[in-house]
Image (tube, helix red, strand yellow):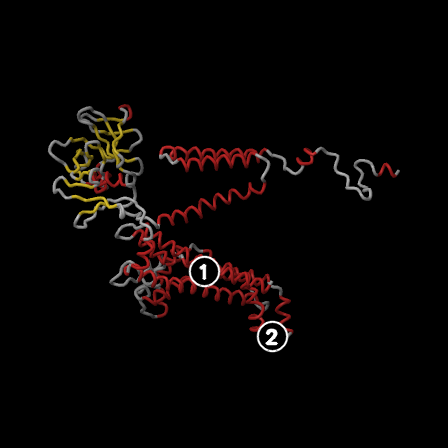
């Protein structure tokens, strides 16, 4: 009997010996740790990997055409790694971590690195491409009609919407009868079977293009006039809406002196590689330049240029006040309401909670526009309701108070919700114990409830501060950064650094992406430092109350 109980597969253990292992083969035991492959899972895996392969192939062609071999190698290695990872039954944790890591790199790390690299360049209007692109633009923009210029019958077309799509010139060579499509990239011959040409040579239809009628072309006459199509002999420009000519560039690039010469006036502009532009002896700079590395010049401008540094530091002070005020005031109001509704003596709390979160349920951009009208001096609800005549958005401090009040209305429901959840997580026994010890409600709140709330809500308050520090919509949709001083229309009293950066990047004087990127790096550094310090203090607070 004893021998039968200690045989293979028995649950009885012999003293001093290892427990008997399963009689299953090792491969069978390992297979038990893997979930069976279902048809649905297999289909999903095939579809997703097919999508990855399609995206990789789609991205490979532009990289090959541009001869970006490093990028192509990274793309190939990443695609091969994903196929290996998801076609093998190993590395289970990595299957879950890799997608999040890829999205983190694509949508967080890469934009930050690209912004940082842009901050060290002069990238902006007039400095977008290579030097060769600038030369082509200079020569094309100086094209003039000269005696003997070739004349073409012109049809204006587009590949998209007639009102907004990119314009294309459809022209017929008067000598060969060849029809070509021209845009800023040059002329492309079209097959005779793809076009319909009326007697006389004018194109009336072309496959893949929508020919504009006279009314549609007239509405875009300025764009048509500005369009320059580079050719081997100069450039093609419109002469009205039905004719075009191939003119000659009066400004030509001379590689010997690395300069641009005007054949009519004899003036010369020499290339300056430090600023990425052609500059004449009298200091005149051609508008078309190229992108170059300028080092710390953009950062130096932010800190030392009086036209930028003054508004920057003034805006920075208000930015901190706005972020702290918006976060602090909304937190205090939301917490006060949460405490009131948390009291067991309150009745109808569910109805109150529904009503109180209505601002949170409304689209914020729409509410910001509504509040802008409510603060209107002449017909706004605020002035009419209280019998006031305040020019809310016309004075510095009234505009600042107005935007904080708007933020209070929009932000307190969120703070009310998170404070309510945190209060419900605090055991009532703790506050009851303080009451037994003779503490007043205020002493109980200050000594027990508030510290426990701050431990739970500090990360949310830090993220709310970071959000409000860059709250573009709150300012731009209400005051647009104004009011502006008469001597500086680029920086207003309610501007945050983010709206100030937006105006630098897309202002009336042309985009300055490099300078705007430098300001963005300052913003990123400030928010990162404040967040890091705050999280450090939060961890210490958690250790005290844990």
Q: Which percent across, then down, holds residue 244?
A: 18, 34
Of 363 and 310, which appears nearest the observer? 310
In the displayed structure, does residue 505 sit left or right of residue 243? right
Residue 462 appears at what percent x and percent y? 48, 60
Q: Which residue is mark 1?
A: 530
| Residue 305 to residue 6: above or below | below
Q: Which of the two labelled residues, at mark 2 and mark 1, occupies the earlier sequence position?
A: 2
Task: Work out how far the residue at label 2 is from the one at label 1, CA to CA, in angstroms.
Answer: 35 Å
Question: Which of the image's four quarters has the N terminus?
Answer: top right
Q: Tell me residue 399's x, y (percent).
A: 34, 65
Per the image, label 1 sits on a secondary structure element best described as: helix
Which of the 4 image quadrants contains residue 380?
bottom left
The residue that label 2 is drawn on is 439
User: How far from the left and from the top, in percent, is residue 408?
Assistant: 43, 63
- Which tag is nearer the camera, tag 2 or tag 1? 1
Q: Residue at x 54, y 35 (%)?
A: 84
Q: Residues within 10 Å of mark 1 (few under 14, many from 20)?
A: some
Residue 35 as seen in the image, left or right of residue 518: right
Determine which of the numbered discs, if any, sits on residue 498 in the image. none
């Amino acid at each position: 009997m004893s021998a039968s109980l200690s045989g293979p597969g028995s649950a009885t253990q012999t003293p001093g010996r290892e427990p008997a292992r399963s009689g299953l083969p090792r491969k069978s035991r390992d297979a038990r740790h893997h979930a069976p492959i279902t048809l649905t899972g297999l289909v999903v895996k095939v579809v997703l990997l097919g999508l990855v392969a399609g995206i990789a192939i789609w991205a490979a062609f532009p990289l090959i055409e541009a001869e970006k071999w490093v990028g192509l190698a990274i793309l190939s290695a990443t695609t091969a790694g994903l196929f290996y990872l998801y076609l093998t039954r190993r590395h289970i944790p990595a299957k879950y971590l890799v997608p999040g890591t890829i999205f983190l790199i694509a949508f967080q790390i890469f934009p930050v690195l690209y912004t940082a690299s842009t901050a060290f360049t002069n990238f902006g209007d007039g400095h977008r491409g290579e030097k060769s692109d600038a030369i082509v633009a200079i020569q094309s923009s100086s094209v003039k009609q000269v005696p003997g210029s070739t004349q073409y019958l012109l049809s204006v077309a587009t590949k998209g919407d007639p009102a907004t799509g990119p314009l294309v010139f459809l022209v017929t060579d008067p000598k060969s009868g060849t029809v070509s499509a021209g845009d800023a990239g040059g002329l492309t011959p079209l097959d005779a079977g793809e076009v319909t040409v009326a007697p006389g040579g004018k194109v009336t239809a072309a496959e893949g293009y929508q020919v504009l009628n006279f009314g549609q072309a007239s509405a875009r006459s300025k764009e048509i006039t500005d369009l320059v199509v580079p050719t081997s002999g100069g450039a093609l420009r419109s002469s009205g809406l039905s004719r075009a000519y191939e003119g000659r560039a009066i400004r030509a690039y001379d590689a010997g002196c690395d300069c641009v010469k005007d054949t009519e006036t004899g003036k010369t502009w020499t290339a300056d590689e430090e600023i990425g532009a052609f500059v004449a002896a009298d200091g005149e700079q051609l508008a078309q330049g190229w992108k170059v590395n300028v080092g710390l010049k953009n950062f130096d401008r932010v800190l030392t240029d009086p036209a930028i540094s003054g508004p920057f530091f003034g805006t920075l002070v208000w930015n901190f006040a706005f972020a702290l005020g918006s976060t602090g005031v909304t937190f205090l109001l939301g917490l006060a309401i949460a405490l009131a509704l948390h009291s067991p003596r309150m009745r109808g709390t569910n109805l109150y909670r529904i009503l109180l979160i209505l601002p949170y349920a409304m689209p914020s951009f729409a509410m910001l526009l509504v509040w802008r009208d409510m603060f209107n001096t002449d017909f706004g609800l605020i002035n009419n309701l209280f019998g006031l005549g305040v020019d809310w958005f016309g004075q510095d401090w009234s505009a600042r108070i107005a935007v904080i009040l708007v933020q209070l209305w929009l932000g307190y429901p969120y703070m009310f919700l998170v404070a309510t959840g945190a209060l419900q997580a605090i055991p009532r026994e703790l506050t009851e114990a303080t009451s037994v010890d003779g503490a007043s409600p205020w002493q109980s709140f200050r000594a027990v409830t508030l510290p426990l709330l701050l431990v739970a809500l500090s990360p949310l308050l830090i993220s709310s501060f970071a959000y409000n520090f860059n709250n573009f919509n709150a300012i731009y949709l209400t005051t647009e950064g104004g009011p502006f001083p008469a001597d500086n229309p680029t920086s207003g009293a309610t501007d945050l650094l983010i709206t100030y950066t937006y105006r630098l990047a897309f202002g009336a004087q042309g985009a300055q992406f490099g300078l705007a990127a430098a300001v963005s790096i300052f913003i990123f550094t400030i928010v990162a430092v404040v967040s890091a310090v705050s999280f450090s203090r939060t961890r210490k607070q958690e250790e005290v109350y844990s």
